[in-house]
Amino acid sequence: MTPPAYPVGGGRGTAWPARARERVRRELRAASVRLPDVFAPGTRLVVGFSGGQDSTCLLHALRHLPANLDLTAVHVDHALRADSAETARRVVDLAHAIGVACDVTRIDVAGYRQTLPRASTQQAARAARYQALALAARQHQAMVVLVAHTADDQAETLLLNLLRGTGLLGLAGMRMDETIALDKLGPPALDGLEPSAATRLIRPLLRVPRAMTLAYCTQFGLPLVEDASNRSRAYTRNRVRLDLLPMLEQFNPAIRTVLARTAELAADDLEALDQAVTQLLPRVAHNNDLDLAAFRAQPRAVQRRLLRLGLAALTGRLTDVPDAPIEDALDLLQTGRAEQTYHLPYGVELCLSRESFRLRRGGRARPRKN
């Protein structure tokens, strides 16, 4: 049962400065126009809730929408700090103060990380967190999961992708509306998750700067539950947040907004490219083979996308596929001879014949001949 709501830091008649409140509400209205099924009156939603400024702003703003949404907050205790259980208790109290029931899921992220040998602690925590939110959505029969990523998070994500090296997909950053296949995150961290489960993730504050979520919480007198790990420079994302972004602000004070907008534009371009490639695919692919002449007639960007989509279909992953083997494979497809093969990542062979080529798993790939 949802606890009764009461005003935190004042009632509706209190004279609050309106700028932050109206900015957040405007973005939620814009999200409701783009996603009317999510924000329809009475829709049951799960909201990821850490108790920090971003998720507190989101939960409070959703609680006061005219649509009267059916909300459940979910806090994931990563068990990474000795005081995490006490932090979870404070988060539950804050959610109740806002007027929303809050579930807590505790996951031993340090232990779970052992099943992800190449993952950092933050990557393991992210995988476990999304699994916990997806399971909560299923248990509550919620349509989607809402999380409170902001324009600052988008800027950090874009910079991290650039530092690693990226294409259009990395430039697009996070999406407002995204479906995440849980088996792509890693092995199950919780009992009760189906291997093929997916969850729809909505980020309605993706255009809102983090400074605005703090102003919103201040205006409404909302207490916050701070996570001390957000100030630790042991994590790369935190160093981007605490060191790199402030340095870039010396060149452009609006760099966070600029980067977030860049990601949004790249996402639009990527969507258009994906649609074009999807429409092209039936003219190029025949069963498991791709017509070599039709493939060569396409711009290299389209060729690259076709090849990467084929690789993803076989392996289920692309995020850590380096650029060099993709480019080498494209060169081979332009000039290669029949019966040549090329070894792509994860044991995938690119095999040429006279008029077509195909990708297949397994086997021994002969080295590329120049």
Image (cartoon, rainbow, N blue to C red):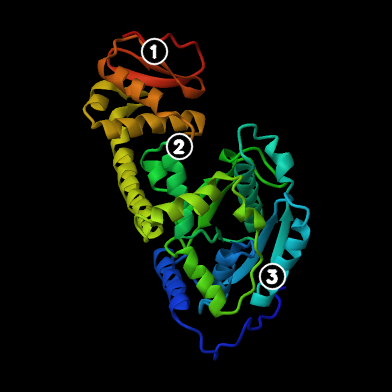
Relative to residue 239, is residue 81 drawn left or right?
right
Q: Secondary structure at mark 1?
A: strand
Relative to residue 77, is residue 198 drawn left or right?
left
Q: Secondary structure at mark 2?
A: helix
Q: Mark 3: few, some, or many residues within 10 Å (few <14, many ≥20)?
A: some
Which residue matches tag 2? 164
Which residue matches tag 1? 341
Q: CA distance from mark 1 to mark 2?
A: 29 Å
Q: Tag 2 or tag 1, which sits nearer the N-term? A: 2
Who's the residue at 39% across and 24% down the image? 324
Q: Could you tell me if the residues under marks 1 and 2 are in contact, i.e. CB atoms within 8 Å?
A: no
Q: CA distance from mark 2 to mark 3?
A: 40 Å
Q: Secondary structure at mark 3?
A: loop
Q: Which of 164 and 323 lies nearest the eye of the viewer?
A: 164
Who's the residue at 24% across and 25% down the image? 296
- Hey, which quadrant is residue 253 in on the image? bottom left
Relative to residue 368, is residue 54 drawn left or right?
right
Could you tell me the amino acid type at mark 3? Ala
Residue 41 % position (x, y):
52, 74
Who's the residue at 23% across and 32% down the image? 299
Q: Is residue 268 above or below residue 124?
A: below
Is residue 43 visible in the rendered image? The answer is: no
* Mark number, residue 101: 3
Could you tell me the amino acid type at mark 2? Arg
